[in-house]
Image: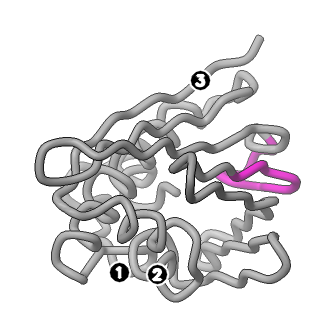
């Protein structure tokens, strides 16, 4: 069985600004993870403090306002559940900003699904939003570690989600 993660966020930035934030190394490192390498339509992302890495085939269509990442390799949250998933961002101008429709589809059953769903809510809905609106996001490893405040594995996931 596969599951899907869906989120929708309104950001106060142009479609062009959001597209750049999703497709250029110098921008991704400012909202998702500092450990980014992009080359020839492929991306490698790391969370070295946890020993996690993700490799993605990355495509974007400026005219269609779409970004699509296909996961080819991953040990995110110590599972391979991301492998074969598609991460997509559909951008639409709305009011004084851009509506970001986020999805991660083809996600296999995994104990880390909820942590990853919440992680995307943080990284897209908080860090990316803040980055495109103010120029300063909160990527890994800069985000606050909430394990001490909330305790337990759930808080660990909140502090370390992609």
Q: CA distance from mark 3 to mark 2?
A: 26 Å
Q: Nearer the viewer, mark 1 or mark 2?
A: 2
Going from N to C along the chain, the mark reached first, 1 or 2, is: 2
Q: CA distance from mark 1 to mark 3?
A: 27 Å
Residue farthest to the top?
1
Q: CA distance from mark 1 to mark 2?
A: 15 Å
Going from N to C along the chain, the mark reached first, 3 or 2, is: 3
Locate residue 132, reporting x and y percent: 27, 70
Q: Which mark is residue 4?
A: 3
Q: Residue at x 74, y 62 (%)?
A: 54
Locate residue 10, reporting x and y percent: 22, 45
Q: Residue at x 47, y 39 (%)?
A: 102
Q: Which mark is residue 27?
A: 2
Taking 118 as reference, is 25 above or below it?
below
Read off the residue under disc 1: 142
Taking 21 as reference, is 1 above or below it?
above
């Amino acid at each position: 069985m596969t599951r899907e993660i869906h989120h929708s966020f309104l950001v106060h930035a142009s479609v062009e600004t959001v597209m750049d934030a999703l497709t250029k190394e110098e921008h991704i490192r400012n909202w998702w993870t500092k450990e980014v390498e992009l080359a020839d339509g492929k991306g490698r992302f790391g969370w070295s403090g946890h020993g996690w890495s993700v490799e993605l085939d990355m495509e974007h269509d400026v005219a269609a306002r779409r970004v699509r990442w296909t996961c080819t390799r991953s040990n995110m949250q110590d599972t391979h559940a991301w492998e074969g998933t598609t991460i997509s961002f559909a951008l639409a101008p709305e009011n004084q900003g851009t509506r970001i429709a986020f999805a991660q589809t083809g996600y296999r059953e995994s104990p880390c699904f909820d942590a990853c769903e919440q992680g995307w809510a943080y990284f897209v809905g908080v860090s990316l939003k803040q980055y495109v609106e103010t120029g300063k996001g909160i990527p890994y490893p800069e985000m606050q570690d909430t394990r001490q405040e909330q305790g337990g594995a759930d808080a660990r996931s909140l502090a370390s989600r992609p």
